[in-house]
Amino acid sequence: MTARQQQGNDRAGGPDEATVDQPDAPLVAVERLETHFPIRKGLLRRQVGTVRAVDGVSFAIPRGQTLGLVGESGCGKTTVGRSLLRLVEPTDGTIRFAGREIRTQRRGELRALRRRMQIVFQDPYGSLNPRMKVRSILEEGLVIHGMGDRATRLERMAAAVERTGLAAAALDRYPHEFSGGQRQRIAIARAVVLEPEFLVLDEPVSALDVSIQAQVINLLAELRQELGLTYLFISHDLSVVEYLADQVAVMYLGRIVESAPVLQLCRQPLHPYTQALFSAVPSVEPSRRRRRIVLTGDVPSPSRPPCGCRFHPRCPLAEAVCREVDPPQVDLAGHRVHCHVAGRELERSGSDPVAASAAIQAAITAATAGASGPCSDA
Amino acid sequence: MTAAPLLAIDNLVTAFKTPAGRLPAVDGVSFTIDRGRTLGLVGESGCGKSVTAMSILRLVANPGQIESGSIRLTVDGESLELTSLPERRLRQIRGGRIGMIFQEPMTSLNPVFTVGDQIAEVVRLHRRAGRAEARARALEMLRLVRVADPEQRLDAYPHQLSGGMRQRVMIAMALACEPDLVIADEPTTALDVTIQAQILELLDDLRRRLGTAILLITHDLGVVAETCDDVAVMYAGRIVERASAAELFRRPRHPYTIGLLAARPDADRRGGGPLETIPGMVPPPQAFPDGCRFHPRCRHARQPQCAAEVPPLRELSSGHVVSCHFAEEIRP
């Protein structure tokens, strides 16, 4: 164990037990989470580099709430979701679920916790074993967690598939007999049959057509209400997140650059990246259409993140300080942002996020006016 | 002569003959595209929008076949019937008069040739250009689609480029011979929103500068609203509604279009109860219902008409055509 990891564990030790039974403590609390992957090369598989997929991410999700985690491909949002369940091993940081430190749990304890936290994946074709009947897919978890005997298991499974909008007869069929939307319902049934408290939803509707997507979104909203579930909703589709989430965190290159209550984030974005992201979403409502901010270039590789602010090579407002100094977090009544320029604008406007957001948008408009520069790979 | 649209598709039927029977993926589709205009062809998976595009270039894979209908391309005052044009002539049209951009730039570029060679190949085929001339044109094209360091990129292989960059290369290939029409099949679906914004802006800029018409095939109504002049909505192999983009999004008339628009989530719909949904799912071609194909999912459907009679495309107002028996009575 490295010194850094040791330190992380010590940090977790203190408040860990104290928060176990506090009902108002967040159900999920993540602090300075880091998940790095080694890049190995050559015959000896020597490590030649590190992909810093998640590089210092902190957030908390209160019970019954939904946190939307948005960002573009490669920003690390999926790795965050998997790290929470320890489907990939985090490198550093703390993850507390219901007050317990996930990273230090032993096998048996972790298994017990995993029943309470489930995951639904993006691809309903890849995430269901084609050789297993729906019954076996659902029963596997129940057996592993020792939930009920044969008869009660069947009852639970029938209730779960019916609750997700399928007929109980679906249990005796194979995944290929279902459409994409129905398969996603099966994946959701597999998660909720274990009566979890927390669901990681990793792009659960991205592979679905619009008319089917709305059905599944409604189902997720109903289940949250009825079962009192807490969601981490990971998506690149901002409109879905706007509709479902209470709080939204925007990730860029392994970090959260801005987080805020949903309406605050989409109506008064402060970070230039959030501004660009929301302006890029095409909308059918002319009133919601903003002046599109077209960023130049692509996201740099997470194995070689830029110095200072990670967004600076693409930021229309980047200044000298952005190239050198990692921006500190500016906290404004639940609206957190990591940006030198946004921090200054907030100060100038007397901590008025509406004025600051408008000022930043105006500055970006001025900086990008007429400039359609060449696009370059990092 | 000047009145003839660039492309006129009339009553196109493309079907796949399979052991399970004849599957009419495209079943009587008609539309026109004028020079320099952008038409959005929208619909969900399996509605036949991609098969329509492939039919235009006669690239429908076996056992698919164009069974009837006409596809007329009018260039230089000459009207060509693409459904019956000899293969040799058609090859001059593909890539020469009509460029094509696909969804997945990684699989549609050849991994063993440099991007410069691939763009140059198009030029050499259609322009009878020499090596040096073709390479110069490829460089010019990379500049046009705003690839940084185009001299170096010319010798790069597709895997060395990012997704957005590959799509720029695809666009460069499609536009290398200054085609009259570009067919873009979900050109930004595999890309992130900020990269999508770059590509859509680029396409629009090139259309304005070069006067190329675009047939944009997409499932994303937002993309259509922001980039297209006209829209055709497809459902189960047929066009159910056609109008200018401004008109369609202001006054959608077909229950399917209305349903699609209402099913879109966003912040403004929060707290307003569940999202509107269209019950059921898109039927596969072997199970297309009789009459109006949307009737089993339509809440306005009335019997016996909707289940028995195919609703004709009717012009409700200038340029706005709808295929619904009761379009006049439906309010969004």
Image (cartoon, coloured by chain):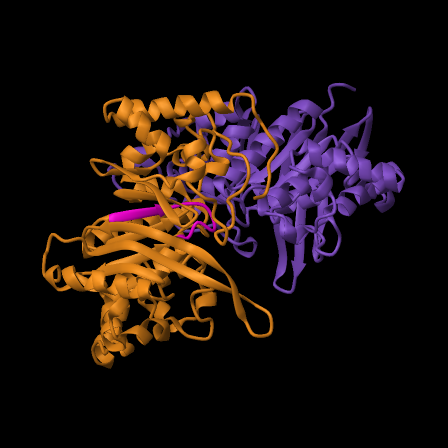
Image location of residue A145, percent across then percent down: 25, 76
Residue for point 43% across, 39% down: A324
Compare residues A320 and A330 and report the one nearer the observer: A320
Q: Which chain is orange?
A: A
Image location of residue B226, percent across then percent down: 51, 29
Asked if residue A364 is positioned above or below residue A113 in the image, the reply reads: above
Image location of residue B134, percent across then percent down: 83, 39
Is residue A294 at all visible to an observer of this figure? yes
User: Quick check: A98 left or right of A241?
Assistant: left
What quarter of the picture does the N terminus of chain B occupy? top right
User: Quick check: A251 left or right of B310?
Assistant: left
In the image, is residue A73 part of the stretch drawn in magenta? yes
Is residue B89 at all visible to an observer of this figure? no
In the image, is residue A286 part of the stretch drawn in magenta? no
What quarter of the picture does the C terminus of chain B occupy? top left
Q: Which chain is purple?
A: B
Residue for point 71% across, 51% down: B65
Which quadrant of the structure image shows residue A370?
top right
Which quadrant of the structure image shows residue A374?
top right
Compare residues B278 and A245 and report the one nearer the observer: A245
Residue for point 29% across, 50% down: A58
**Part of the protein shown in magenta:** A66-76
Image location of residue A2, percent across then percent down: 34, 67
User: Quick check: A295 left or right of A265?
Assistant: right
Residue for point 75% across, 53% down: B113
User: Quick check: A3 left or right of B316?
Assistant: left
Asked if residue A140 is positioned above or below residue B316 in the image, the reply reads: below
Compare residues A102 and A153 and report the one nearer the observer: A102
